[in-house]
Amino acid sequence: MRTPIIAGNWKMNKTMAETKAMITELAPKVKDANAEVVLCVPYTDIQTAKRAAKGTNIKIGAENVHWAESGAFTGEVSAAMLKELKCDYVIIGHSERRQYFGETDETVNKRTQAALAAKIRPIVCVGETEEERENGLTEKVLERQIVEGLKGFKSKDFDKIVIAYEPVWAIGTGKTATATDANTTIGYIRHLLAKKFHKSIAEKTRIQYGGSMNVKNCKELMKEEEIDGGLIGGASLKPDDFAFIVNYDK
Ligand code: PEP
């Protein structure tokens, strides 16, 4: 049995004061959740978020991590730094990082290695663009992202790695993959994990759906067999909406 995981991705939103207010309001609304609850927040909010979430079931993550231990990488943050803040999770390879900041499958792989070495759980994002989808390339793109991005990882690593399938055309656009389509594509990712890694890895790895998941569509998406949770952007900024999604099974 895979425990569902609902994770928020705040992107470049919320000050420290807003972080404290949001988590204080959210915590009682999600305290009985059956899913694992995670908020991935800007670096500057991590310490405030950890303090506000202390004693609750809300785990805190970052939105990126560099692979080097230290050095001349202006603007970057290492896994050891995140570990010191007691970060539980980190998002890696989000499509916005791939699109605007030159993230590649190779850097996704290196960042994932660094996170695991620091005992931080990586949420590795994959997904096709609209153009790739229209050209019938979805499966090919996902295969490349999974094979290259997760190359070299062992079975025990997949106890920690979460995969987020996020079709790029559905992120922040209000367009959602239908529950059936999302289920089929996530089923394909699971098939890839079995073929390229091992059947047991395919069975145990949690795969989220992400892309305009909200209060209206979360129940339908979460009913699907292959979907083990959601990575939520816009709707994770509002306590009531995020709590509703976390409590999708109530
Ligand atoms: C995301 O940023 O990972 C995301 C899924 O965003 P949204 O929910 O706003 O589409």
Image: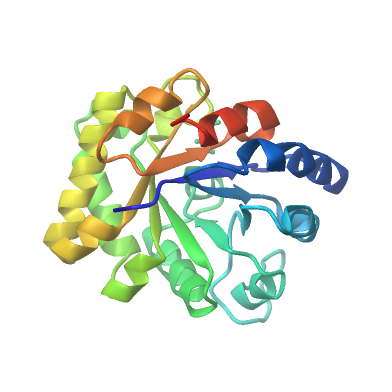
- Horizontal side of residue 124 vs 158, given as left or right: right
- Horizontal side of residue 118 vs 178, given as left or right: right
Q: Residue at x 54, y 28 (%)?
A: 172
Q: Position of residue 93 (x, y in %)?
A: 47, 54
Residue 89: name its quadrant: bottom right
Please say if 83 is above or below 123. below
Q: Residue at x 60, y 32 (%)?
A: 242
Along the viewing direction, whichever of 240 and 11 lies nearer the viewer:
240
Q: Residue at x 45, y 67 (%)?
A: 112
Residue 48: name its quadrant: bottom right
- Horizontal side of residue 156 vs 138, given as left or right: right
Q: Residue at x 18, y 43 (%)?
A: 188
Say whether residue 116 is visible.
Answer: yes
Say whether residue 238 is visible.
Answer: no
- Horizontal side of residue 185 vs 66, given as left or right: left
Q: Position of residue 49 (x, y in %)?
A: 75, 53
Along the viewing direction, whichever of 116 and 241 lies nearer the viewer:
241
